[in-house]
Amino acid sequence: MKKNLTHIRFVKHNRVYYQKQAKRAEAVKLLLEFFSRIEGKVKGMRGYAIMDGIEDQEYESIILTFWENKEDMDTFYKPDNKLLTDLVERLKPLFEQMPRRESYSMIEFKV
């Protein structure tokens, strides 16, 4: 059964490259702990997806966060958000380079 998720209006796409596959596993564990801890507590955030590259990009992860509105998304990703900056500081030694972030508006999302 498909569900129309019209309340999800914006997506933040985070592309992360790790130093090696072992670092990716460590980082994913930290990411899962982070999202579990903040679930339901961040205004406007409606969910997330963590995906690992399986072909040529075995040291890459994509993290998507789903938002009701752009303002809440922008607020969460501001440099002064201690929740996010603390996570990035913990993950920084595992990165090959700093994550690249892009914002998107949702046209349609069905699952």
Image (cartoon, rainbow, N blue to C red):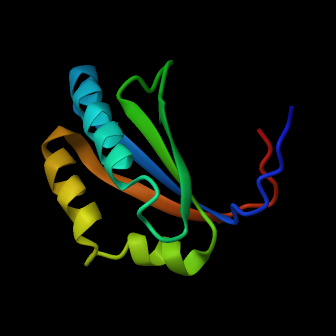
Using the rendered view, name the quadrant where residue 9 is placed.
Answer: bottom right
- Horizontal and vertical percent for residue 65? 52, 54
Which residue, as the protein is rendered here, is positioned at the far right? 1
Foreground residue among 105 and 2? 2
Q: Quadrant of the C terminus?
A: top right
Query: Which residue corresponds to the image point at 48% horizontal and 71% vertical from the top-left?
Result: 43
- Horizontal and vertical percent for residue 54? 49, 19
Q: Quadrant of the N terminus?
A: top right
Q: Is residue 76 left or right of residue 3?
A: left
Query: Which residue corresponds to the image point at 32% horizontal and 42% vertical from the top-left?
Result: 31
Foreground residue among 14 and 5? 5
- Horizontal and vertical percent for residue 84? 28, 62
Residue 83's place in the image compared with 71, above or below, is above
Q: Is residue 10 left or right of residue 71?
A: right
Query: Which residue corresponds to the image point at 28% horizontal and 22% vertical from the top-left?
Result: 21
Foreground residue among 1 and 13? 1
- Horizontal and vertical percent for residue 67? 59, 64
Query: Which residue corresponds to the image point at 55% horizontal and 51% vertical from the top-left?
Result: 47
Residue 16's place in the image compared with 57, above or below, is below
